[in-house]
Amino acid sequence: MAGTPAITTDFGAFPETVEHGKTGFRCHTLNEFVWAAQNAPALNPLYIRERAVARYSMDVVRWQYQTYFERLADLWGKGWYSLHKDADEYWLRGYYG
């Protein structure tokens, strides 16, 4: 959230969380890691911070948890067959849009 670029591997969750060339670099070789470290200062810290806040701040994540716990609560009712007055628009529209 501080605007610091990430330098990571290209495996696991990093392809989903690090926007290559914008919020950091995802690397495969030692040469790529060295290059990334040398070029990280050129990335825009304001953009990195704004993207992190838009995706991972408590104002965003709390709704993800709310959705998750509401789904769990449905398990004590009709489960998958539970219908609600409103669809979970937050989930259907995506977390960030």
Image (cartoon, rainbow, N blue to C red):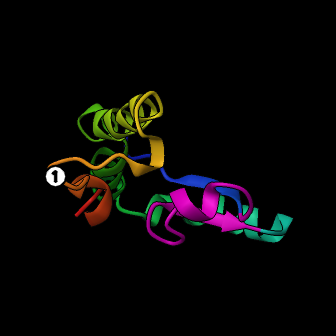
Q: State left or right for residue 36 relative to residue 74.
A: right
Region in magenta: 10-27
Closer-to-camera residue (96/28): 96
Q: State left or right for residue 35 relative to residue 85.
A: right
Q: State left or right for residue 11 relative to residue 60.
A: right
Residue 52 visible somewhere in the drawing = yes
Image location (x, y in percent) of residue 37: 64, 58
Quadrant in the picture for residue 78: top left
Closer-to-camera residue (43/57): 57
Instruction: Please report the residue visible at 32 percent of the width from the left and 33 percent of the height from the top.
Output: 66
- Mark 1 sits on what residue? 86
Quick one: quadrant of the C terminus?
bottom left
Residue 94 visible somewhere in the drawing = no
Amino acid carrying mark 1 in the image: Asp
Instruction: Please report the residue visible at 34 percent of the width from the left and 38 percent of the height from the top.
Output: 61
Density class for disc 1 (Cα within 10 Å; few <14, some 14-19, many ≥20) is few
Image location (x, y in percent) of residue 53: 29, 44
Image location (x, y in percent) of residue 32: 75, 70
* Tag count: 1
Q: State left or right for residue 79 relative to residue 90.
A: right
Q: Is residue 48 above or below residue 70?
A: below
Q: Is residue 4 above or below residue 35?
A: above
Instruction: Please report the residue visible at 42 percent of the width from the left and 37 percent of the height from the top.
Output: 68
Q: Is residue 82 magenta?
A: no
Quick one: quadrant of the N terminus?
top left
